[in-house]
């Protein structure tokens, strides 16, 4: 292929790629059935609940983000942990704001401190535990949104040690399994 033909075909290919990406974005942002309203969430605002000992404040849910993501602030004491599990449908991002969080993703175990961020891709087993002697404050982003519905459901369970069969049944509805 001659140089000028290569350049022309490359430019045409890149243009088509860019146009298709732009089209996908414009469909998302210009859909008239979607009403995107700004939302201010003050520090103490949000839906507060406890899910299996995890103290959560849901800051943004699917109805706020057109189903794109959920944003949850977590405040937990040292020793609090969630066992190893797998999300089939969601990716998660943990951003540690205060304290220390030990996170296991696949075979790797890392301790995160204030300012650290970790990405947990779907289909990869992971768990977390608050370590050290101080409470943690973590901002958890979940992509896409919807998992807050599972948390709402689990927050309704009776206090005390959880019935693991019931917890597993709820998780299965949302394509999450403990490993």
Image (spheres, rainbow, N blue to C red):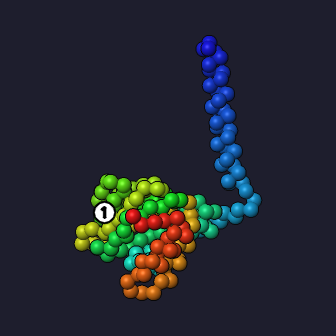
Q: Residue at x 24, y 72 (%)?
A: 133
Q: Residue extending furthest right?
A: 32
> Dot 1 lies on which element?
strand
The image quadrant that residue 145 belongs to is: bottom right
The crowd level at tag 1 (other Cα within 10 Å; few <14, some 14-19, many 20+) is some
Q: Quadrant of the C terminus?
A: bottom left
Q: Residue at x 31, y 54 (%)?
A: 108
Instruction: Please indicate whether residue 21 sits to the left or right of residue 158 in the image.
Output: right
Q: Residue extending furthest left?
A: 133
Q: Residue at x 48, y 56 (%)?
A: 122
Instruction: Give residue 50's position: percent from left, percent from top.
Output: 44, 79
**Residue position for label 1:** 102
The image quadrant that residue 116 belongs to is: bottom left
Query: Does the rendering let one see residue 70?
Result: no
Instruction: Give residue 40's position: percent from left, percent from top.
Output: 56, 69
Instruction: Please indicate whether residue 30 sits to the left or right of residue 52 in the image.
Output: right
Q: Residue extending furthest front?
A: 165
């Amino acid at each position: 292929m001659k140089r000028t033909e290569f350049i022309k075909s490359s430019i045409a290919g890149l243009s088509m790629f860019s146009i298709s990406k732009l089209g996908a974005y414009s469909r998302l942002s210009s859909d008239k059935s979607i009403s995107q309203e700004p939302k201010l969430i003050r520090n103490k605002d949000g839906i507060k609940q406890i899910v299996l000992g995890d103290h959560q404040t849901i800051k943004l849910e699917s109805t706020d983000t057109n189903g794109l993501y959920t944003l949850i602030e977590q405040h937990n004491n040292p020793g609090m942990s969630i066992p190893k599990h797998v999300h089939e449908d969601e990716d998660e991002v943990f951003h540690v704001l205060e304290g220390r969080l030990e996170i296991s993703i696949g075979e790797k175990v890392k301790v995160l401190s204030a300012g650290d961020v970790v990405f947990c891709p779907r289909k990869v087993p992971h768990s977390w535990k608050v370590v050290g002697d101080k409470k943690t404050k973590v901002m958890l982003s979940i992509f896409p949104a919807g998992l807050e519905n599972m948390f709402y459901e689990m927050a309704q369970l009776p206090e005390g040690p959880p019935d693991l069969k019931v917890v597993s049944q709820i998780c299965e509805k949302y394509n999450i399994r403990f490993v």
